[in-house]
Amino acid sequence: MASAPEAVSGRFQSILIIDLGSQYTQLIARRIRELNVHSEVVDNKLTAAEVKRRGNVIGLILSGGPNSAHKYGSPQIDKKLLALEIPILGICYGLQLLGSMHGGRLEAAKRSEFGRTELWVDNQDDSVLFRGLNPNLICWMSHGDALVTAPRGARITAHTDATKVAAFEYPKKNMYAVQFHPEVSHTPWGIDLLRNFVMGVCQATGDWTMGNFIEQSIESIREQVGEDGEVICAVSGGVDSLCTAAIIDRAIGHRLHPIFVDHGFLRMDEGDKVVEAWKGHFKSRLVRVRAGKRFLDELKGVTDPERKRKIIGREFIKVFEEESRKVRGAKYLAQGTLYPDVIESSGIGMHAHVIKSHHNVGGLPKRMKLALVEPLRDLFKDEVRRLGIELELPRPMVYRQPFPGPGLAIRIIGEVTAERLKILRQADRIVRDEIEMAEMERPWQYFAVLPAIKSVGVMGDKRTYGYPLVVRAVSSEDAMTADWSKIPYKNLEKIASRVIGEVPGINRVCMDITSKPPGTIEWE
Ligand code: XMP
């Protein structure tokens, strides 16, 4: 079995973010990447030797963190990193650590600063970080300790009411530091400061573009699978699996075998759209396995949510395995693992919040003895979307709202039957169409849920006994927390009248007004 290839990102200039425990570490990496410069989150055990070995590191950033840098046992960095002559930027705890390592005095602040804080720039003419910025700014602070004297030889470049050393620069030592958080959106000009560091100090060329990424990935995939390696890939219709398949298709064409297990729980016309998007665009042939009946049979009489999920997951693997066996000699399995999954599983940034991830094909490689091809493992989700556009995938697919692997089956409470599936599919289409027309910011997710109860209604002088439909719409940043979306009344009214008028079997429409927590986004 071939070994895993070197990460594609190794071929780009890179800024390493040394994680010192901040909840914003990943955000720093994302911001740097917005500047078309690759950045990676690394453990604070990173050694100078490792940085040298990498050979592509043009800058280091020390993240913030909840500890006191002067207390015993607080996270430190390899001192030899400072002798590498690679520019280094300390943020918050990073400033305190750099400052105290170079003779600056660190103390518990007389006045802590949390939240929006007014900042004054000092010695702006000599500052690289604040070049071109306003001399008086609003920044986001979050600290209980403060550096009260800067290292000898360094210039103080900003202060606040409470903090004398809110930023310092020490060009001779290639060292820069800010007490506030330039990476958060509450420091709106923070990206300009990061740009000044990355472009001005580190001299980045901005080579991290999705166009370059595609080129490098194609090379790397070809190196990994060789002249004759065959790769199978599960396509679900989501942007991750589509991009995974699309980029491998570009690299090896017909030696990719994309398999689309259609479990029958997709939304209206979704399966056809996936096939359509594939046709004409790619060299490999997308095999659609229509397994809807099989999944429904397995779910007969099942009402427990966890059992439903398990059955669907198990059946998915079975169908996929059966289909893959038809591909002779395949040695590789492509998977849409993303960078946040990689960070999580490496244990870096344990303090950062956990992004929920689901893998429909989890467990497959071990059973099938296949080597993994993971072309997206360097990318954040927003980069995957940019990649999708660059790969010319249809926009609605690239920007598709999150949709659970088990599909509509977990939005039908109680038993999933063909009849109830048809009802939900029709109603869900109406709900989505109408919400998309509403004059409001598009919610993070918006869909319909079909509960397992019936109630009495009246329609055209006739008594009805039908299902209610629940409209669920939420705003969120990362699905970990969510707020229910305030859909305008007139759109809700339209949803209710259309659903009841057009979907036989439903006689009532309700709205879920629970946020997460305490609710979850999905109902099962
Ligand atoms: P909950 O319901 O836990 O959902 O608030 C959080 C986010 O995860 C999505 N979700 C899933 N995604 N497979 C997936 O790929 C799944 O089994 C699954 N279950 C929930 C959900 O839509 C929301 O975005």
Image: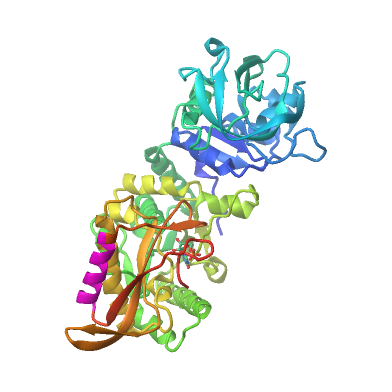
Main secondary structure type of the part rendered in magenta: helix
Between residue 334 and residue 17, name the one nearer to us.
17
Point out residue 472 in the picture as x, y percentages from the top left corner: 38, 65
Q: Kindly tell me whether residue 272 is visible in this rendering.
A: no
Point out residue 364 in the picture as x, y percentages from the top left corner: 52, 68
Numbered range of the magenta stretch: 490-503
Q: Which residue does the image show at 49% across and 75% down from the upper left? A: 309
Describe the colour scheme in one phrase: rainbow
Q: Position of 465 compared to 409: left or right? A: left
Counting labels gives 0
User: In the rendered image of this protein, does residue 3 appear above or below residue 310?
Assistant: above
Specify the quadrant of the image occupied by residue 142. Answer: top right
Between residue 393 and residue 412, name the one nearer to us.
412
Q: Does the magenta stretch include residue 498?
A: yes
Q: Position of 473 compared to 143: left or right? A: left
Residue farthest left in this picture = 460
Between residue 94 and residue 7, name the one nearer to us.
94
Q: Which residue does the image show at 53% across and 10% down from the upper left? A: 125
